Amino acid sequence: MLKNDLLLRAAKGQEVERAPIWLMRQAGRVLPEYRATRSKAKNFIEFVKNPELACEVTIQPVDILGVDAAIIFSDILVIPEAMGLPYQMIEAKGPWFENTIKTKADVDKLRIAEAGDLDYVIKALQLTKKELNDRVPLIGFAGAPWTIFAYMIEGSGSKTFSKAKQFLYTQPELAHQLLEKITQSTINYLKGQVAAGANILQLFDSWAGVLSEQMFYEFSLKYMSKICDALSPLVPVTVFAKDAHYAVQKISETSCNSIGLDWTINPLTARKQAGTKTLQGNADPCLLYANEKKIIEETHSMLSAFGKNRYICNLGHGLYPDIDKQKVKFFVDVVKDYKWE
Amino acid sequence: MLKNDLLLRAAKGQEVERAPIWLMRQAGRVLPEYRATRSKAKNFIEFVKNPELACEVTIQPVDILGVDAAIIFSDILVIPEAMGLPYQMIEAKGPWFENTIKTKADVDKLRIAEAGDLDYVIKALQLTKKELNDRVPLIGFAGAPWTIFAYMIEGSGSKTFSKAKQFLYTQPELAHQLLEKITQSTINYLKGQVAAGANILQLFDSWAGVLSEQMFYEFSLKYMSKICDALSPLVPVTVFAKDAHYAVQKISETSCNSIGLDWTINPLTARKQAGTKTLQGNADPCLLYANEKKIIEETHSMLSAFGKNRYICNLGHGLYPDIDKQKVKFFVDVVKDYKWE
């Protein structure tokens, strides 16, 4: 039994005493403790593949920041790797794939990943679950199929992901075949995460925003919806489609439990569109550069707009590495100390 | 008298026989003819500062693509340069400023630019106006104050513009002083463009999307609105705030004439929010990678959604350099040949 199950109750739409809070990229460079652990690994990929180190940084923010959940430290691009498309993480540049997907032969060659292909993540989850000792829920996650697809075609980050979108426009059937393979792999992977102890899951569609509305529904939401159908009978699932501002209602029509919002979304508008689904978000990460007065003001206004129930407090995107750890802690405390009406 | 004044009539909300079309970045790398002209200059900055070359590439798309307007070839960052903050354009990386704005002393040191400081753009406009011989309208433009500010603080492009946003959160009063100086410079510059022959103006807020809704109103729209008030009595003004999906109604409340939309905006929703203002946009640039059948299908659907009047056809962002010139021409022809009901 979890000692603090606020996050799970909020995700399921049950009553809470106060809104839970966790932060995207809470296990990250914003903590000096993370950077110390990170320096023990030769490079980022080795770091991700080391269950002991992953466990260590996963738990740090629970101890240091007092957040209401741990999110397993990993990377969304472990899926392409498990499917047969390895990548490197280039310092200050981001992910880079030596090979990318161009043809039907490339798609056919990819295997559908099993949870066993990602045993280092599974081990990290098991270890973390044990170390957490039921203090807070453990969040598992994966990239949304479209975002994974985008990297597999583009081969790196991009402002426009124009190669990946070109693929959708010129080879839509092959795109669907690849998205289907990624979806099956992701379902296998997430089921493994749940078996290893994940209490709740989040799908990150980091590059939803480059798609038009119709393309988002056809090439992204369709596959996230399949993943929700497979996983939400087991644990709550959150869908976070960054910059898909038009999609709150359509996301709420899937079997997801909660909907992540970026900071360009008005909480009251989202509430109207989301039916009874829980909302998660959505402070601007840059708010944490401000002074305490401004942080209190903006945070109170956000909490009051979302309301206490069916709400998970978070940022609208990940923490930026140069944000002061004390400010992050301050923000968490402001949320935890808020006097709900 | 202009032989083709479709764009001006559409911007003013007057009746048209068909919707006008022009394309953001039509004077750009998508045309081999542009690349040939570009190779005559030592670097990008020299290119921008050469009125003869700028005139040449401005007119190319009118001759080659048959668009209904020319847009003066220039760069939004000529304003910081004219204010005393020069930049370089680094191949494949984008703009880079050796000095950035950090303190009140930095802001105080900047001068308010006069049109005369940008005589190379004024000359390019005069030359183009003469060469165009009234075939189509000539569009002048400037960056929105927030976007210019973002580069002046950040010093380069950025996914998050977190330094520029940090400045807004930590030094809001100084930010307003700088934005005011940029606004005054931009008004002087755009008045000079009109005097030199620009028939219509566009403000590009390329980085509106990194701001939250409230911050967009406070730090961006307020200043675009001032520019509209100063210029729209002279010529029609279009405001294009990329990714500010929530702002169509608020933009429509300024004295602008038309509102640019990116491809994530639903035309019918925008129509409801925009009152009687003209809308401009909003095809996904990647559509031009598709086959002709798909281009026809999507373009017809877009045209029918916007309707014939109070509409300027365009993309939702600039042309990407690797798009096939023949496809661009095909898209322009599809729009011009559309049978309006």
Image (cartoon, coloured by chain):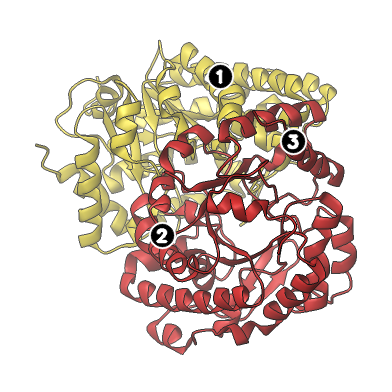
Chain colours: A yellow, B red
In the displayed structure, A240 sits above or below B201; it is above
- The type of residue carrying mark 1 is Lys
Q: Is residue B15 above or below residue B138?
A: above
Dot 2 falls on a residue whose secondary structure is helix
**Pointer 3 residue:** A166
Q: Residue furthest front?
A: B1
What's under tag 2, amino acid-wise?
Answer: Leu
Q: Is residue A300 left or right of residue B221?
A: left
Residue at image location 47% in from the left, 58% down from the top: B256
> Which residue is under mark 2?
B221
**Please, what is the three-letter code of the amino acid marked with disc 3?**
Gln
Chain to which mark 2 belongs: B
Q: Which mark is residue A222?
A: 1
* B80 shown above or below B228: below
Number of the label disc, if any, that sits on residue A167: none
Tag 1's secondary structure? helix
Residue under disc 3 on the same chain as residue under disc 2: no
Kindly report the distance in space between the C-alpha atoms of the residues bearing marks 3 and 2: 33 Å
Q: Which residue occupies 47% across, 12% down?
A: A229
